[in-house]
Image (cartoon, grey):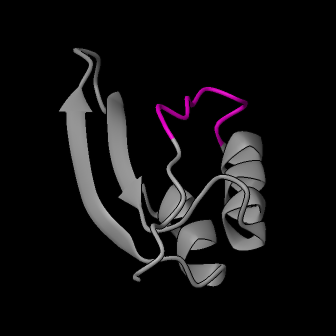
Amino acid sequence: MAKVIGPISHNGINMSALHSIPLGGLREYAFYVELEGCETDRGVQAALASIANITDDRFVVLGSFPKANAN
């Protein structure tokens, strides 16, 4: 988990939620992470690229939503 959180922190991205789900094997977990940022943001792109490398592309982006403008 620390390996995945590192790129998020390094790129200055706020993490709003982190959930771990046991997969049944010893020390095998899936993680659900909510980040503040959009998939098109440079920092988010860099973090996702690092996470893809760390996890051998075993991760999925479930959604990406740009921040609404406050008018």
Residue 56, position in %: x, y?
72, 31
Residue 57, position in %: x, y?
71, 29
Magenta portion: prevailing SS class: loop
Q: Which quadrant, please, contains the N terminus?
A: bottom left
Residue 20 part of the magenta segment: no
Specify the quadrant of the image occupied by residue 36.
bottom left
Nearest to the observer: residue 51 or residue 64: 64
At horizontal 48% and vertical 75% (from top left) the residue drawn is 69
Residue 59, position in %: x, y?
57, 31
Among all residues in the image, which is located at the extreme front?
71
Among all residues in the image, which is located at the extreme top?
24
Q: Is residue 25 left or right of residue 62?
A: left
Q: Is residue 50 left or right of residue 18?
A: right
Residue 56 part of the magenta segment: yes
Nearest to the observer: residue 25 or residue 60: 60
Residue 3, position in %: x, y?
55, 60
Magenta segment boundaries in residue numbering:
55-63
Q: Is residue 2 above or below residue 11?
A: above
Q: How many marks?
A: 0
